[in-house]
Amino acid sequence: MNIYIFADMEGISGVSGSDFVRLDGLFYQDGRRFYTMDINVCIDACFKAGADAVIVRDGHGSGNNLLWSELDPRAEVIQGNSGSTRLPGIKGCSAIILLGYHAMAGTTNALLEHTYSSTSIQNMWLNGERVGEFAIDSTIAAEYGIPTIMVSGDDKVCEEAKNWIPEIVTCQVKTGLTCQGARLLSRETAHKLIREKTIEAIESINRIKAPVINKPVKLKKEYVERHQIHIGNNVKMIDGHTIEITSNSLEEALLIG
């Protein structure tokens, strides 16, 4: 049994604002340590629950955030640019865990809410339903036949995940107060929760189903500013800020534009 961990920084325990997740942030180095610690707790719990191998994808920004020298040596890690593949190396895995996620753009009182880019993307819709990174990434995993079994982050992303995959195990390590503030669990409590929820999720693999999406998919992207893009057979302009991509692959559609 191989487990894939796709990790983002905004929902990591101890992170309470942009200064922890941006390269120029005052607390970015602390954020990197908190990120690596949460990932290590999750890796250890995966092996305790019977995993044969664990693959970690550093999924925040450039993909070069976790501290490789401090990562649990039993896991493999994918860092840097992965090109046209959102989830490189996921084929053959039994399940995926989305660790440290955040709510979709526009979610009230959610910590660091956005959808892929807080500066360029206003909203996204998948087959007419407004979605965030959780729904899209879990659906891309589903295109490989792989269920998303756990998410960690604030209360808002946990609720969002339950609405998309009712059976999913959620791990709430903080409560969002504003976009730039949160009520945090202690490090010890948060890590204990991540460990317990990871084991629970792996023990629940057989009852958690991958979401099924009608094909072809229609992914609509609303940009903050006017966006220049080549309009082709599978891409149409809705208005000056919005395009709609039609594709048989959500992963492919995500990377257009």
Image (cartoon, grey):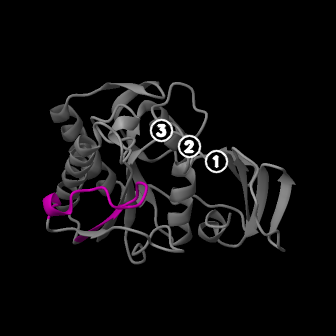
x, y percentage for residue 76? 24, 71
**Which callout, 1 or 3, points at the residue further toward the start of the chain?**
1
Q: Decide: few, some or many residues near mark 3? Use Cα within 10 Å; few <14, some 14-19, many ≥20.
A: many
Residue 111 appearing in the image? yes
In this figure, which residue is indicated by the disc labeled 1?
Answer: 121
Are dots 2 and 1 in contact, CB under 8 Å?
A: yes
Q: Secondary structure at mark 2?
A: loop
Q: Nearer the viewer, mark 2 or mark 3?
A: 2
Seen from the viewer's position, the closer of residues 7 and 47 is: 7
From the image, tell me which residue sits under label 2.
118
Query: Of helix, strand and loop, which one carries label 3?
Result: helix
The amino acid on which the numbered mark 3 sits, given as a three-letter code, is: Val
Check residue 175 for magenta coloring: no
Q: Is residue 55 above or below residue 118?
A: below
Question: Magenta stretch containing residue 61, yes or no?
Answer: yes
- Alpha carbon of mark 1 to alpha carbon of mark 3: how far? 18 Å
The quarter of the image holding the N terminus is bottom left
Question: As drawn, is 109 to the left or to the right of 22?
Answer: right
Q: How many marks?
A: 3
Amino acid type, callout 1:
Ile
Label 2 vs label 3: CA separation? Answer: 16 Å
Magenta stretch bounds: 53-72
- Quickly name the residue at label 3: 157
Residue 165 is labelled as none
Q: Is residue 166 left or right of residue 171?
A: right
Q: Residue at x 40, y 36 (%)?
A: 18
The residue carrying pointer 2 sits among few (fewer than 14), some (14 to 19) or many (20 or more) residues within 10 Å by Cα, namely few
Q: Tag 1, which secondary structure? A: strand
Task: Name the spot of residue 26 as percent of width and height, x first.
Answer: 30, 36
Which residue is drawn at the image coordinates 41% and 60% (left, top)? 62
- Do the CB atoms of the residues marked 2 and 3 lie less than 8 Å apart? no
